[in-house]
Amino acid sequence: MSDPITTRIHEMGRQARAAAHQLSQLSSETKNAILKAMARGLRDASAEILAANAKDIAAGQEKGLSSAMLDRLRLDENRLEAIAAALEHVATLPDPVGQILDDWHRPNGIRIEQVRVPIGTIGIIFESRPNVTADAAALCFKTGNATILRGGSEAIHSNRAIASALQTSGEKAGLPEHSIQLVPFTDRESVAAMAGMDQWLDLIIPRGGKGLIETVVSLARMPVIKHYDGICHLFVHEKADLEMAVKLAVDSKTQKPGVCNALETLLVHRPVAEAFLPMAANALRAKGVELRGCAETLAILTDAIPATKGDWSAEYLDLILAIKIVGSTTEAVDHINTHGSHHTDCIVTADHAVAEHFLRAVDSACVFHNVSTRFADGGEFGFGAEIGISTDKLHARGPMGLRELTSYQYRVRGNGQTKA
């Protein structure tokens, strides 16, 4: 491990711990004013941020990044405005810090309250998407947490520009120094340094490919909330409205293919396969989607590409879709629970009893009935910007908003009670 990198990151950890103490004391009104100042700061720095992003795009093209990856990386005026607007939206959301979750009195007169409090210091390691810098910083700040962000090399110039704008503009409105810090290194050593400093970080959240997440999990000395692959399924049941199913499949796959809640595998109930698949194939191919099918699918869509075993567990993040015909809802559920990533899965059906069975049986963070998988998103859930979508079960699951960035403490009040 490189000593200069470790030394610098541990210094950032000490600074974050000091900032977290100050952040925990800020009122909701002050935090909201700071968030609005950050949004103005992003708009004021738009020229610098877009120029920095152009450097990242040029470097990405030179490296041969896929079109989907470049799209995740790219910023423009509209996307930057959306990031700023998301900060302002977070300012309008209820502050969970200080919320009394429960309170009760004991027979001896002691009163006990369970109260939401900040987690403290949070490290976030992410790849490619520069909007995560602002989204993560805003949500962590609103909940009184100091943040250390480590982005990927693909977005280093964009991330630096965004983080600088947030901290600089926020400080003018009362943001404590070092509340939002961006690791200046993209070396792998920086990941190991963050994962090992449990004396400074209370929680670490990796967002990115499976390799990154597994590396962090193997190294982390503090709790980790994982955001694994988005291998999302849509099951077209025999009682589905087929036109609705086509619409949902197209939206789920093509509205933004390079994101974790995009559709990757389409499961089709055998009784409707011959009617549904040609309809779906025409609509998907019109959007440029490559279709990979099981043997039964190939008998109907003769020009589809034969699917391999690996296709059933693939997160393409591109205009590619695997298709499998199944004989029952049970077979669909078994396939999802075996090959999915426990992220987001949907059934299309008019049979509500079947839908309820699917929702109970599929072991995923988000289970949908007649809804595009693209709605698995903190913003769409009303959480504002999100940290990501957790595929863990403890302590957070699904889209992570403000509440998931808090812990709780017990506040006990009495008038001199003793055990003796």
Image: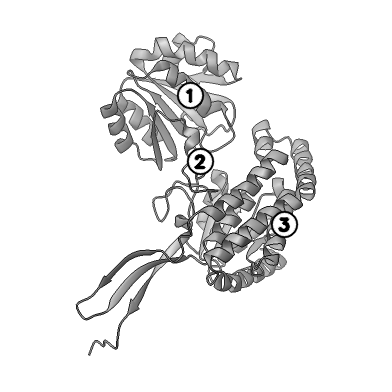
Q: Position of residue 124 (x, y in %)?
A: 58, 56
Describe the element under mark 1 as helix, strand or loop. Answer: helix
The image quadrant that residue 366 belongs to is top left
Q: Circles 2 and 1: CB distance less than 8 Å? A: no
In the foreground, 276 or 369: 369
**145 with respect to 381 (left or right):** right
Residue matched to label 3: 165
Q: Position of residue 188 (x, y in %)?
A: 65, 55
Residue matched to label 1: 249
Q: Which residue is drawn at 46% across and 64% down?
A: 97
Q: Where is residue 308 in the image (x, y as percent from the top left)?
A: 49, 24
Q: Between disc 1 and disc 3, whose residue precedes?
A: 3
The image quadrant that residue 111 belongs to is bottom left
Residue matched to label 2: 229
Q: Between disc 2 and disc 1, whose residue precedes?
A: 2
Describe the element under mark 3 as helix, strand or loop. Answer: helix
Compared with residue 122, is residue 271 higher up or lower down, i.e. above or below? above
Q: Name the mark on residue 286.
A: none
Q: Residue at x 33, y 13 (%)?
A: 271
From the viewer's perspective, is the residue at label 1 or at label 3 nearer? 3
Q: Residue at x 36, y 74 (%)?
A: 411
Q: Between disc 3 and disc 2, whose residue precedes?
A: 3
